[in-house]
Amino acid sequence: MENGAVKPVIVAIDGPSGTGKSSTSKAVAAQLGLSYLDTGAQYRAITWWMVTNGIDLTDPTAIAAVAGKPEIVSGTDPSHPTITVDGVDVAGPIRTEEVTSKVSAVSAVPEVRTRISELQRLLATGTETGIVVEGRDIGTTVLPDADLKVFLTASAEARAARRSGELKGADVNATREALVKRDAADSSRKTSPLAKADDAVEVDTTELTLAQVIECVVTLVEEKRAGK
Ligand SMILES: Nc1ncnc2c1ncn2[C@@H]1O[C@H](COP(=O)(O)OP(=O)(O)O)[C@@H](O)[C@H]1O
Ligand SMILES: Nc1ccn([C@@H]2O[C@H](COP(=O)(O)OP(=O)(O)O)[C@@H](O)[C@H]2O)c(=O)n1
């Protein structure tokens, strides 16, 4: 690029629940001066709207019919990510157990995915310095031309322990069961399932500290930028 301007870098981070996508993505974006997008929060937000409006979530046709209605806006500052639905701040309500247990049914509906993926591509291509986008299908479907793709994994035990630590006092076995069930639903749906892209770098975080994972991804981004 001319004038020494650095080309925006697009980083896709995918993987199952509890592998460290959000914590890693936020920290990497903050360290490198990039934007950050939590695509899971967008699927949670549309699910929250459907629950609040009494949509029958056992009926994909009913979900598809209203998929275009809520206006979802994501703020992409990694030190202060925000999410609103029709102007309402839903950062808290989208993390309830009810939304968590229902989000896979909503995110499996193709009309929902088309709508949310459009928002994601708009945000990803509109940044000056670049963006870290985390989710399930970013490297495979949403941004297949991303400069760097990372696929995080970790054992179900480690992921459940991390999550139940967050949900203060939650039973590890119940957390593990819910997490494995959601992964299975997300991995087996027909439209853009949770999957590793062929050209993604896989990082098993089971035995790594969060700081080590962050360092690993920062190094991978820097190597890409240096053209290695
Ligand atoms: N490598 C790690 N070691 C220990 N705890 C971690 C690690 N990575 C993330 N965590 C913790 O696990 C929890 C889930 O991480 P999060 O980034 O939300 O995962 P995801 O976005 O993949 O669901 C958080 O409390 C986070 O601090
Ligand atoms: N790119 C994405 C991101 C999330 N999702 C869906 O949204 C749900 C919530 O994602 P999340 O990233 O907030 O989940 P956690 O891993 O943080 O628990 C997932 O279980 C998927 O059903 C998706 O289908 N595609």
Image (spheres, rainbow, N blue to C red):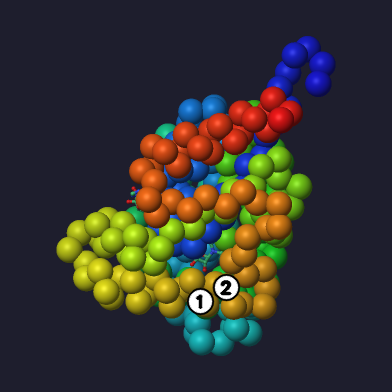
Q: Name the residue under label 1.
A: 184
Residue 212 at x, y percent in the picture = 42, 38
Look at the image and tell me in which quarter the C terminus lies: top right
Tell me the crowding category of disc 1: few under 14, some 14 to 19, or many 20 or more residues within 10 angstroms, Cα based. Answer: some
**Quarter of the image where one finds residue 194:** bottom right
Q: On the rendered structure, is 62 left or right of 153?
A: right
Q: Is mark 1 on a helix, strand or loop?
A: helix
Residue type highlighted by circle 2: Ser
Looking at the rendering, in which quadrant would you find the N terminus? top right
Q: Are marks 2 and 1 in contact (CB under 8 Å)?
A: yes
Q: Distance between the residues labelled 2 and 1?
A: 5 Å
Of 126 and 170, the residue lying toward us: 170
Could you say where residue 127 lies in the image, as x and y percent from the top left? Answer: 66, 34
Residue that extends furthest to the front in the rendered view of this protein: 207
Three-letter code, disc 1: Ala
**Number of numbered markers:** 2
Q: Which residue is drawn at 48% across and 28% down?
A: 31
| Quadrant assignment, res 224 | top right
Residue 137 x/y as whole percent? 63, 60
The numbered dot on residue 187 is: 2
